[in-house]
Amino acid sequence: MAGRCWLSQKIPFSMRGRILRFLLVGSFTFIVYFLLQNALVRVRFGPLEALSIAYLVSIMFHYISNALFTFKNNLLHALTPARLIQYASVNFGNYLINLMCGKISLMLELPVQVGMVVGVAITTLTGFFFYDRYIFKRGENDPFT
């Protein structure tokens, strides 16, 4: 078909909606993360401590928002111990990536916020893959389907 992006032809329609909702939730999560980190630095937290606290608060917002809005799970489905452990594992890896990016920014004498942006860009791609395929996936073996 003329005029259609080749990428949109490769991505199933149902996944496009999840991707758009994921990016919307991610945008709001980043705003929470960025504003809270800056606010904490202003009240005398160190930049990496502020990054850590802001990251923890923002992933709680991210989990609930993605479970209910992006992947359309009910709360009972989203709050199973196995899913929380999977989510925590993925986000611990993402946290280490963000912390490393923040530390590299400081070593290069750049603001820690530069590292935050780079870290979020890296973990957005890996995050969607793991959330969509493993954590929030609903299928025939799922007792909550």
Image: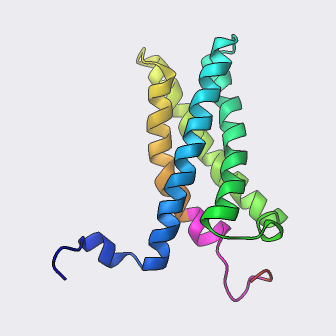
Q: Position of residue 80 (x, y in %)?
A: 83, 66
Q: Which residue lies furthest to the top in this view?
A: 44
Count the marks: how many?
A: 0
Quarter that holds the N terminus: bottom left
The magenta segment is: 130-142
79 within the magenta span: no
Q: Position of residue 54 (x, y in %)?
A: 67, 32
Q: Which residue is drawn at 80% across and 83% down?
A: 143
Q: Which residue is drawn at 32% across and 72% down?
A: 8
Q: Residue furthest bottom?
A: 140
Along the horizontal axis of the image, is 131 left or right of 1?
right
Quarter that holds the C terminus: bottom right
Q: Position of residue 62 (x, y in %)?
A: 65, 50
Q: Is residue 142 depicted above or below 93 in this figure?
A: below
Task: Depth check: give the residue in front, 88 or 113.
Answer: 113
Along the horizontal axis of the image, is 141 left or right of 112?
right
Q: Residue at x 54, y 58 (%)?
A: 22
Q: Is residue 61 depicted above or below 126 in this figure?
A: above
Q: Which colour scheme is used?
A: rainbow
Q: Which residue is drawn at 50% across and 51% down?
A: 124
Task: Depth check: give the residue in front, 46 or 29.
Answer: 29
Q: Which residue lies furthest to the left in this view?
A: 2
Q: Position of residue 3 (x, y in %)?
A: 18, 73
139 within the magenta span: yes
Quarter of the image for residue 28 reads top right
